[in-house]
Amino acid sequence: MTSGISRRARVLAAAVGTGVLVPLVAAATPAAAATPAVTCTSAKAGLAAKLKQDITAALATRKGTVAVGLYDRSTNTTCTLRASSAYDSASVVKVTVLATLLWDAKKHNRYLTDRENTLAKAMITKSDNAATSTLWKQLGMTKIKGFLTAAGMTQTKPGANGYWGLTQITVTDEQKLLKLLTAKNTVLSDNSRAYILKLMGQVVSSQRWGTPYGVPSGVTVAVKNGWLQRSTNGWRVHSVGAFKGGGHDYMMTVLTHGNSTMNYGIATIQAVAKVIHKDLAAS
């Protein structure tokens, strides 16, 4: 009987051993692959490899979680990193708010009122929060969601209870929005697109950091940044920009969280932007 128990014990020990080991081995593969890599494609020979190498190097020593999107129409170049990861929008959502306002006005065949123009300008050029809250409330969730659907921004989830800064955004959707702003489409009129880009081109100097960093001279810049500190994931620091000139027509989104300070997040974004501008200018 003793030997019977010990045999059962040995069998049980072997089974437990196997049961523990197998999941560990299985789990090791996804964990090892959990750090996503920058992926780039381009119609221009050598450009994708250069961008992948330089963006990866720019982020190699940076802490925090970074998502990157690049699209250049001129060379049909795309780069992505964590394209579908969700981030609290902070003030980057203000471009979506203005786009929604103009989209809705077009549907009702009307121009913006003087009041709306004043609010829109303050919201984009100075990142005025009170103006944003007023327009967010005026539009309401139905119109905001209506625009997101029309724009194909299926990964964007508007913040609840008026908290527009907690809207969930992704690189994929921000790049979709920038593409709408920079080429003819059926969602936004040409006048609406020009108006948004004009305001993004008039952002006050203290808020022109981020994606415009290192932009070559003669290239036009449209930018909107966002920053927000919360108890989890530290500082969210984001920058979206559209750039045209020097033989290129490109848009860039860099979203970050887990930054120890706002300036740390800015430095991370600018490290990425600098190499992107440089590589495109050289291509």
Image: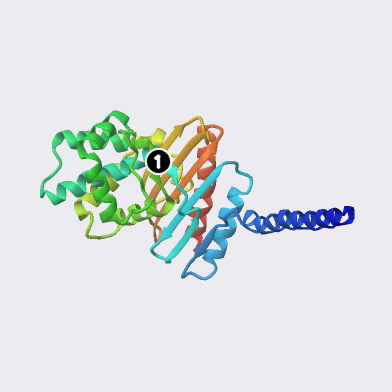
Position of residue 111 measured from the top left corner of the image (x, y, whole percent): 13, 44
User: Mark 1 falls on what kind of element?
Assistant: loop
Instruction: In the rendered view, tell whether residue 160 sits above or below residue 182.
Output: above
Q: Position of residue 283 (x, y in %)?
A: 49, 63
Residue drawn at 45 percent across, 53 percent down: 84
Observer-nearest residue: 228 or 11?
11
Classify residue 132 as left or right of residue 155.
Answer: left
Q: Position of residue 191 (x, y in %)?
A: 19, 51
Taking the spot 31% from the left edge, 36% from the top edge, the residue there is 125
Please report the residue visible at 45 percent of the width from the left and 62 percent of the height from the top.
78
Q: Quadrant of residue 131?
A: top left
Question: Residue 157: x and y, percent?
Answer: 35, 45
Can residue 219 be seen here?
Answer: no
Looking at numbered disc 1 in the image, what kind of residue is underneath it? Answer: Ser
Residue lying farthest to the right in this orientation: 3
Q: Looking at the image, which is closer to me, 205 or 129?
A: 129
Q: Give the total number of marks visible in the rendering.
A: 1
